[in-house]
Amino acid sequence: MLWLLTAACGGRAASGGGEHPTPRPRVIPLARAILLETAGSPPPDTSVTFIAGEPRTIILRHGPPDNVVFAELVFPPHAFGDSGLAVRVDLHPRPGVYGVDLATTVPLRGGATIVFKYARYFSAPARARAVYGSDVAFERALAVGELQPGGMLNLLPSTRPTPDNLSAVIQAAGSFLVAAPE
């Protein structure tokens, strides 16, 4: 009886609403990654200037008419040190996918968080359905990846703080993409 109950419950947590990290970081060729696609009006490029040592949250939204949140970047007070210098953060969303190029005028010292929000415009490519069998299985395999030199993608430990949100801590400026391994 106990065996039947255990088998019926499954061994996996639901994909929404939990701080369950994805497996340890993995580096894969970008060509072997399946990127999460997006539809709707793309978010515009964004530049924000603020003083280092102050917390800052930057929200990127899809364009009109929906203005749905695409991504959120959270910079805690220590993200750029306590220098009091002006920091400019430039964000360039990547067309057609959940991805952002991040540049800063002061080096990021780590501890910032990026959260991609895909509830409205989640679009699993046909290749994802072929590999994973369903949109749900593909969504469970997603992680935030950091683009590395030589066309490699470092899949960062990622969590799902709420359904249809994928979050990762970032240590430096760079290019970040939502992807799953092929």
Image (cartoon, helix red, strand yellow):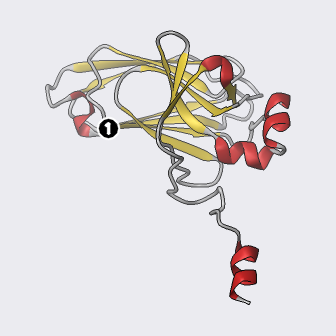
The residue that appears at 83% across and 45% down in the rendered structure is 134
Question: Callout 1: helix, strand or loop?
Answer: loop
The front one of 44 and 97 is: 97
Q: Which residue is mark 1?
A: 111
Across and down, in percent, residue 2 comes to: 69, 87
Number of numbered discs overlaid on the protein picture: 1
Dividing the picture into quadrants, the one containing residue 169 is top left
From where the camera sits, is residue 119 visible? Answer: no
Across and down, in percent, residue 68 comes to: 66, 37
The residue that appears at 18% across and 20% down in the rendered structure is 85
151 with respect to 38 (left or right): left
Q: Quadrant of the C terminus?
A: top right
102 with respect to 177 (left or right): left
Q: Is residue 114 above or below residue 4?
A: above
56 with respect to 181 (left or right): left
The front one of 172 and 182 is: 182
Across and down, in percent, residue 75 comes to: 34, 35
From where the camera sits, is residue 14 visible? Answer: yes
Q: Is residue 1 above or below residue 121?
A: below
Other-residue count near label 1 (Cα within 10 Å), few / some / many at <14 / 14–19 / ≥20: some
Residue placed farthest to the top in the image? 150
Type of residue at label 1?
Gly
Q: Quadrant of the N terminus?
A: bottom right
The residue that appears at 75% across and 36% down in the rendered structure is 121
Across and down, in percent, residue 172 comes to: 35, 24
